[in-house]
Amino acid sequence: MKLNRELLRLAFRQWLYQWRQSLREVKSYGGKPRFVIPWLWLKLSYLLDGPYAVSRRYQRRIKAENIYVYGETPLTSLELIAEKSGVTSEDHVFELGAGSGFTSIWLYGVKGCQVTAVEQVPVFCWRLHRTIRRMRLSSVNVRCEDYMTSPLEEASMIYLYASDLDDHVISELAERLADLPAGVKVITVSYALQPFLQREAFEITDQFTVPFEWGEAEVYIQQAVN
């Protein structure tokens, strides 16, 4: 009974945070129809079945050790990250672990860049793909794939918010990203990639703190130097 009450409190806090954040996002970006119309459509698809619930069901299905691994980048924090990283409409941003897809919608609708959302949870992929199709967002693509194996050749910038990864997974990911062409930017939350490598592959060009639902985190902007 105590565990159930704790889970209910956690679910309520998440719900309250999400809707408070939604109001901030409407206030900040409501004047941008290219963003706000797809954003509202996608929001409606999560009205009765939120992203955290979708993620927990998937983690249970694959028998994950930790089913509470989901998190989203607040769009007001994403704006700061985008400004610091210098993303423009000329970029092709790959979001690794795109989740519900609100980050990808923002990057397209506010920054005007091409976006590839890589996500392996089928419900996330299906709802984002449906939004893209209905709203005719030709510059947003969804890949229902594992970002550890999905091709990254077209990326000029990569964004990864996965602060709960084990060190050996980060090491494997860093080795993979170390083969990116020189000049590609990689943005990670909570850790830099170079300390997990034996070879020189990335230069940190900026490091700063932004707020997330659970507190503040360090964001690292790195550039491939191959």
Image (cartoon, helix red, strand yellow):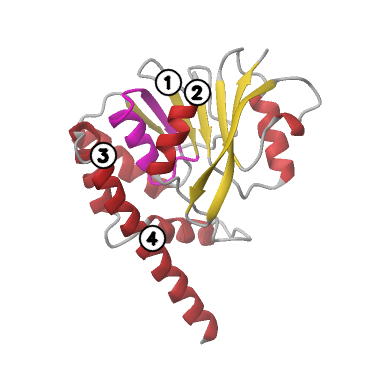
- Tell me if residue 101 can be seen: no
Q: What's the magenta region?
A: 97-118
Magenta stretch contains residue 63: no
Q: Residue at x 45, y 40 (%)?
A: 98
Q: Name the residue under label 3.
A: 29
Residue 128 drawn above or below residue 89 = below
Residue 196 as seen in the image, left or right of residue 8: right
Q: Mark 1 points at which residue?
A: 92
Residue 163 as seen in the image, left or right of residue 139: right
Could you say which is closer to the camera, residue 132 or residue 20? 20
Closer to us: mark 4 or mark 1?
Answer: 4
Tags 1 and 2 in contact by the CB under 8 Å rule? yes
Q: Residue at x 31, y 58 (%)?
A: 19
- Tell me if residue 192 can be seen: yes
Q: Which amino acid does label 2 sit on?
A: Met
Q: Name the residue under label 4.
A: 17
Q: Name the residue under label 2.
A: 157
Tags 4 and 1 in contact by the CB under 8 Å rule? no
For marks 4 and 3 on the same chain, the one whose residue lies earlier in the sequence:
4
Distance CA(mark 4)–CA(mark 3): 18 Å
Q: What residue type is labelled 4?
A: Tyr
For marks 2 and 3 on the same chain, the one whose residue lies earlier in the sequence:
3
- In the image as oriented, which residue stretches furthest toward the right? 198
Residue 124 as seen in the image, left or right of residue 22: right
Distance CA(mark 1)–CA(mark 2): 6 Å
Q: What residue type is labelled 3?
A: Tyr
